[in-house]
Amino acid sequence: MKIVVDFDVCQSHGLCTEAAPELFEIRDDGFLYILNETPPDAMRAKLELAIRECPTGAIKVEG
Amino acid sequence: MNANPIVVVGASLSGLRAVEAFRRRGVDRPIVWVGAENVLPYDRPPLSKQILRGDWDAARTALKANYPMLGVEPRLGVRATALDTTSRRVTLSDGESIPYSGVVVATGASARNLRGGEHVPGVHVLRTLDDALAIRAALEKRPRVAVVGAGFIGLEVAAVARGLGLDVTLVEALETPLERSIGLTLGAAVAALHTSEGVTLRTGVGVERILGEGNVERLLLADGTHVDADLVVVGIGVEPETAWLAGSSVQLERGVLCDSRCRSTAPDVVACGDVARWLAPSGKTMHVEHWTNAVEQANAAVASLLDGDAAPEYSPVPYFWSDQYDAKLQFAGQTEPADTLRVVTGSVATRDLVATWGRDGKLTAVLTVNNPAVFIRTRRAIQQGAAFDAG
């Protein structure tokens, strides 16, 4: 599976970094970084939590 | 629970997240889902921002949902009108009576208006998509704008109207904006932010009367002064939508009164989102009218309905945000008036702030302006019970 973030929509709320700290990070520049764009399937539940908790609906998973 | 349907009452964010949670948990019982509005679940935060500014069309607020996979769509324009916890049935406004195995109350809240305001053209509240579209249309006529109530909705409306170059007066009964959530010191700083953007601020004074022939023309204030306006937007809080539960065994107390697991006083009836008031670990009841709570509490309520006492207690660190001009405010936690405030860095005026609150040596809350990285680190620290550094 592949993580796709719409960075035009993302507002750096950062809730995804709580749901899945292995996958997302807000850095001091204020922007979101994806730490692993193609995580193992074992991460799917955490990634789906991040998707549900994102206030701007910026995160998608492909595959 | 038996095989009767689960009834989810309310088709906004919390209702949608509840339906999704049931299916994620593998519950394949029928779900009867009703929503009072005639539109599929949509997202409210953009209403006071992108929709008012005219940046988005209405369709863009629709919440992403995979209805075929959920196996259910909300029945739109249908309300629940009564709950009978003895015969275990929900009565709907279309006359149907549904036997239930469980009920999720996610009916939300409705916006309060000024006394008589609902009868005066030009006076609006902002809660629904229709409300937002009506205000958007009114803004296009370039009115003089008065905003009543300097909470988050009022402040965002004021910011959008100033952004459109309109004259804006903001009237607030308390001494500063946001006084209850962030206190006088930072409330005054938010007031200064709006003044610097050209908003006329009238704080510490309430609205006495609305005047106007055919359309609103003037607000009379309690100190005898007045504000002339062609458009008035009222943001003075909400009333939980609980009228349909009156007379049932569900206890109401400024919302649906719930235990620490979002369970009402009636068996198999849970509540989530703006309508719920639940017992916090502090022993006080809590009520949070924000986006993230609608999401997190829906999951907690569904877990309680399915797992009972085995479900975790609901004890979130509340989060809300607000966009005003080029300032993104983010707040997490809960403050009490006696908490110690520490401005860690910056100021609201420079649109670069980190402020924290503490009580009994523990970190209780954080407010940042345009500092998302520090914000999320500090929110996590609150969740972990971190110590308060008084500086």
Image (cartoon, helix red, strand yellow):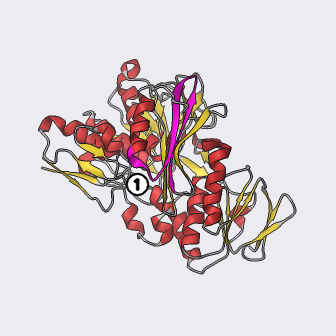
Q: Where residue B208 sits in the image (x, y, percent)?
A: 82, 59
The correct choice, above or below, for B43 with respect to B382 in the image is below
Does the segment drawn in magenta span residue B368?
Answer: yes
Q: Nearer the viewer, residue B355 or B212?
A: B355
Q: Nearer the viewer, residue B158 or B21?
A: B158
The correct choice, above or below, for B333 with respect to B172 in the image is above
Does the segment drawn in magenta span residue A24?
Answer: no
Secondary structure of the residue carrying tag 1 is loop
Q: Which residue is mark 1?
A: B41
The correct choice, above or below, for B292 with respect to B154 in the image is above
Type of amino acid at the residue the image marks with label 1: Pro
Q: Where residue B1 sits in the image (x, y, percent)?
A: 35, 25
* Residue B33 shows up from this direction: no
Q: Chain of mark 1?
A: B
Is disc 1 surrounded by few (<14), some (14 to 19) or many (20+) residues within 10 Å? many
Residue found at the far top of this picture: B309
